[in-house]
Every structure is written in structure tokens, then in C-alpha cells.
Image (cartoon, grey):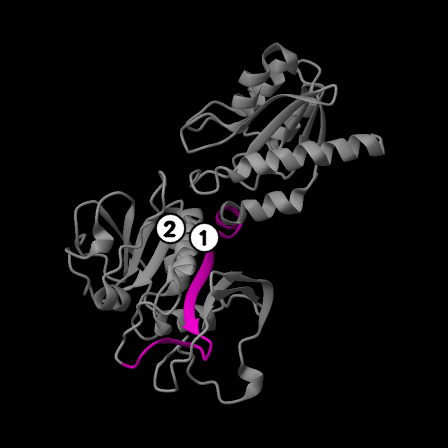
Amino acid sequence: MSNADEVLAKSFMARALRLAERGRASTQPNPRVGCVIARDGLIVGEGFHVRAGEPHAEVLALRAAGEKVAGAEVYVTLEPCAHHGRTPPCVDALIAAKPKRVWVAMQDPNPLVAGKGLAKLREAGIEVHVGVMGDLATELNRGFVSRMTRGRPWVTLKLAASLDGRTAMASGESQWITGEAARADVHLLRAEAGAVMTSSATVLEDDPQLTVRLDGSWRQPDRIVLDTHHRVPSTAKVWADGARRFLLTTDAGVAPPAPGVEVLTTRADSAGHVDLCSALDALGRSQVNEVLVECGPRLAGAFVQARLVDEIVVYLAPSLLGHDAQPLAHLPGMVRLDQRVRLKPKDVRLVGDDIRVTAVLEAKEKC
């Protein structure tokens, strides 16, 4: 393989990744996948996976390319599936089309695939190259990778605060600390995560919808409520139809709070509340890839102290609320500087008049 082949492969794989991005808010619980087919340096077919149950990226690209696939180069962001799910195995369709080479960004972490698709291609005499822009493909599917390798979803904690780190006045008044642009950005985070989690305290205080309210047609995210003592009423907006809804509780005998709500039973922690590790494991079994946690300071602090946050997104408004206002996260027991929670910034940008900071915890999870 020449340097020219590698350069061309990166160019077409970059196009495949851009296609996969189009399914960022719609493919759950499936991964986001794009595929490009090229012949003599020109694209002859391409496609991306839109939603579960619909054709995969490779099938759409093969349809677009038609007879031009034979002897062509295929660039796909994820190893072609090799098992029967809602659709037939893509690897069989690729083998039947007889391409010259298949370039794959990353191996599929799903145990049902996990190299089987690559092996079948090679057994059929098709040249296979793996790892082209693999880091970008892995990041694009971080939730799917998390569920397949850790058995739990990727967790993003969303917070909004004033510059002095306050999320609400002492009275609880908090609408709105941040501006309209930041709030719209949060709706996009909800759509991309595909699931939103909150606490019973937040529901009782704010009665949030936890929906995506942006122009256009959007898949509504799953709505998840941690409610140990079954305090959230059936009339809460979070239980409205239009998405999957989950109640996480320690009581196996509790009835659903509203029609269509799925009750997931978890272990209790030392205080008798829903154990967060158990809760995430239950969501993983329910095919939740990513969770955006939007909550008050107590649940936010619990996630941080348990080191169960993969990423934190904080919107900082250019205002000061004063020392009597409510804190960003409840983190009891910290009396020395060496006990502080260390973060590593990934991105800082302006969203309207607010500052959005994206960071990761340096310490690993405790369970």
C-alpha cells in the first residue's frame, strides 16, 4: 500500500465520517455509520445509517453505486455487521458486490461482530485495512462503545451557573441564568445524547419536559427519573408520551407512575437511595448509549464523587448571584485542597453571551 493510497483513504474516510455525523441524533441504540464507495478516485456511491430498523450505511452506498462496486474501494467508519439483527448482515452484501478493497475506521465492539465481519471479508479474498481515522470514529460512537465495552452508557453532566458558580437563588429561582443561545445548545445536547436523566427533586421543583424543542423533526430523547421514594406524580410533564420513559427505583414492586413508563429496579446505596452504578448498568441493559444528566446540586455532586461522569459541560453566564445562592454541586467532606475534584478541559467556547466549558474528570470511576 502506497502513501498515495493512505492519503486517498483518509480523504474518503473523512467524507464517510461526515456522513455518519448526520445520524448523530437519530441512530440510537445503533452506532453512527457512514460509507463511501470510490472507483478511480471518484465517489460512485455513499450512504449513512439514519435509524434502527432502516438500511445500514453500506447497503445504501451499495444501492447508489450499483454495478460500479465491483473492483471499487469501500470506506466505512465501522466494521460491517456479520449477524442478523433487524436487517441482514452487511458483510454478505459487500462480499456479493466484489469490491477490491474495504477500508474500515474501527472494529465493532459489539460481541456479536467483534472482528467477524473483517474475517469474512478476508476469507472471501477481499483486501481489508483497519484503523484509518479510527480515533475519530471511536469518539463519534463513544456511547455505543461504552455500552458494548462497559455495559453502561456514556455520561455527560450538564450544568449551568453564574461566574461565581451558583445555579439558583436561595429561593430556588433559576430561570433563566443563561441566555437563549445556551438553552438552544442544551436542546442539541439532548438530541445527540438520546437520553436525559434527572432526579425526583428536580421534577418536583421545576416540572421539566426534558424534550428537544428545536426547529425541524427530531427524535425525542428517552426520559429517565431517579425516584427512590416514588414522589413524582403521574401528571409530571416528564411522563408525557413521545419517547421511552424510565423510572429508576430500589423498589421492585412499584407500579409504573404513568402508562408506558418502564420501571427499572436498582440496588440501594448506603443511604438507601438509588445506587448510581446499578442505575447505569440497568440503562445499559435497556440499550441506552448516552445519558445527559440535568439535575440539581445533590445528584450532580453524587455523580462527580462516584467518578461516574465521562464529560462535564458547564454553561457560565456573565453574572454573579452571590454567596447565598445555591452551589453548582454538593460535594460534602472536602476540607483540604488535595481533595478537590480535578478536571481536564477539552473545549472552551462562547455560546451567545455565555461561556461553554467542556471537561473530563482526571480520576477514574469508583465502580
- Judged from the image, the secondary structure of the residue bearing numbered disc 2 is strand
Q: Quadrant of the N terminus?
A: top right
In terms of image quadrants, where is residue 164?
Answer: bottom left
Q: Mark number for residue 90?
A: none
Q: Is residue 53 left or right of residue 149?
A: left
Residue highlighted by disc 1: 153
Figure check: 196 above or below 24 = below
Is residue 288 or residue 243 the one in the foreground?
A: 243
Query: Local crowd at mark 1 within 10 Å, few (<14), some, or many (≥20)?
Result: many
Q: Residue furthest front?
A: 353
Q: Which residues are magenta?
A: 146-170
Is residue 140 or residue 124 the one in the foreground?
A: 140
Instruction: Check residue 101 for magenta coloring.
Output: no
Is residue 17 or residue 252 the one in the foreground?
A: 17
Query: Local crowd at mark 2 within 10 Å, few (<14), some, or many (≥20)?
Result: many
Figure check: 209 above or below 312 = above
Q: CA distance from mark 1 to mark 2?
A: 10 Å
Picture coordinates of residue 240, whole percent (x, y):
21, 49
Mark 1–mark 2 CB contact (< 8 Å): yes
Q: Residue furthest right?
A: 2
Query: At x 48% / y 63%, what residue is drawn?
Result: 313
What residue type is disc 1 on?
Answer: Pro
Instruction: Check residue 152 for magenta coloring.
Output: yes
Picture coordinates of residue 319, whole percent (x, y):
43, 76
Q: Residue furthest top?
A: 67
Picture coordinates of residue 212, whole percent (x, y):
34, 49
Picture coordinates of residue 204, whole percent (x, y):
21, 66
Residue highlighted by disc 2: 195
Residue 104 visible, this angle:
no
What residue type is disc 2 on?
Answer: Ala
Q: Is residue 239 left or right of residue 74?
A: left
Q: Is residue 367 left or right of residue 245?
A: right
